Amino acid sequence: MFSFAEKPFTINGVKSWIQCLDCYADESNEHDKISVENYHYHEYIEYLYALDTDMNVWINGTPYRMVTGDLIIINSGELHNISFNKHCHYICVKFSPKILYFDENSLFEFKYVTPFLSDRVPKKLFHKCELENTDVHGLSCEILDEWNKRSPAYELIIRANILRIFSGIFRFWDT
C-alpha cells in the first residue's frame, strides 16, 4: 500500500503543535476519492467532528461511517483516508500528543496519552447519540473560532477545550 507521511505544519516557519481546519468536501472531488496514494499518517492526534457529513473514514484499512454529529479519533501514526458520500462539512483538529500531559516524567498524566500513541484506543467513533450530554459541538466550534481569530491567548483556550473533550472521552471509555 502506498502512503505518505504528512509533514508537520508550521506557523511563520515554526513547527506548530496544533492545526484546525474548517473542511468542506464533495463526493465529486476526484482528489477525495479513496485510493492508496491518498492514505497518509502523521505524528499528530487528529479528531474529526461532523457538522453536516456523510463520509467514510478509513483507519488502518477499517472503514468507519461518520454522519452529522459524530466524532472520530485518529491516533498518532495511524494510516488513514476519507471518502465522501455527499457534500460534507466537518471540523478537523490535529494536535501534538504532548498537550494531553504536562510533563513526560509525570506518570500521573502520561497515562492519558499512551492509548493515542499505540493502537489501544477502546473506541474510535462516537455517534451523535453518545455525545448528547456533552459539549463536543460547542467546544469544537470554539476551537475553530479561536484558531481563525487568533486573539490573545487563543492557544490556551484551544488546549483547554481539547483537554475538556478528551477528558470526556476518557470518562466514556471508563464506563
Image: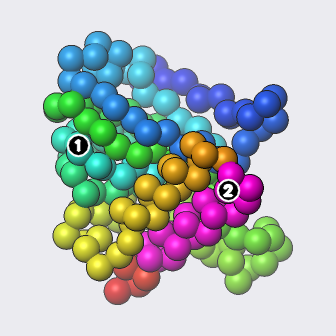
Q: Which image quarter: residue 13? A: top right
Do the residues bearing badges 1 and 2 touch, measured as CB atoms within 8 Å? no
| Disc 1 secondary structure class | loop
Question: Which quadrant, please, contains the C terminus?
Answer: bottom left
Residue 70 highlighted magenta (yes or no) = no
Is residue 71 in sight in this rendering?
Answer: yes
Amino acid type assigned to the residue bearing label 1 in the image: Thr
The one nearer the camera, 66 or 120, is 66
Label located before the other in sequence (1 or 2): 1
Amino acid type assigned to the residue bearing label 2 in the image: Tyr
Residue 163 highlighted magenta (yes or no) = yes
Residue name at image x 46 percent, y 20 percent: 2
Disc number for residue 154: 2
- Please say which color scheme the image uses: rainbow
**Residue highlighted by disc 1:** 53
Which residues are the magenta region? 151-170
Residue name at image x 21 percent, y 24 percent: 27
Q: Main secondary structure of the magenta part?
A: helix
The one nearer the camera, 26 or 32, is 26
Query: Which residue lies most toward the bottom here?
Result: 175
Numbered disc in front, either 1 or 2: 2
Residue 79 lies left or right of residue 110; in this view the side is: left
Question: Mark 1 and mark 2: span between their CA atoms?
Answer: 27 Å
| Disc 2 secondary structure class | helix
Residue name at image x 66 percent, y 47 percent: 150
Q: Which image quarter: residue 60? A: top left
Question: Which quadrant, please, contains the N terminus?
Answer: top left
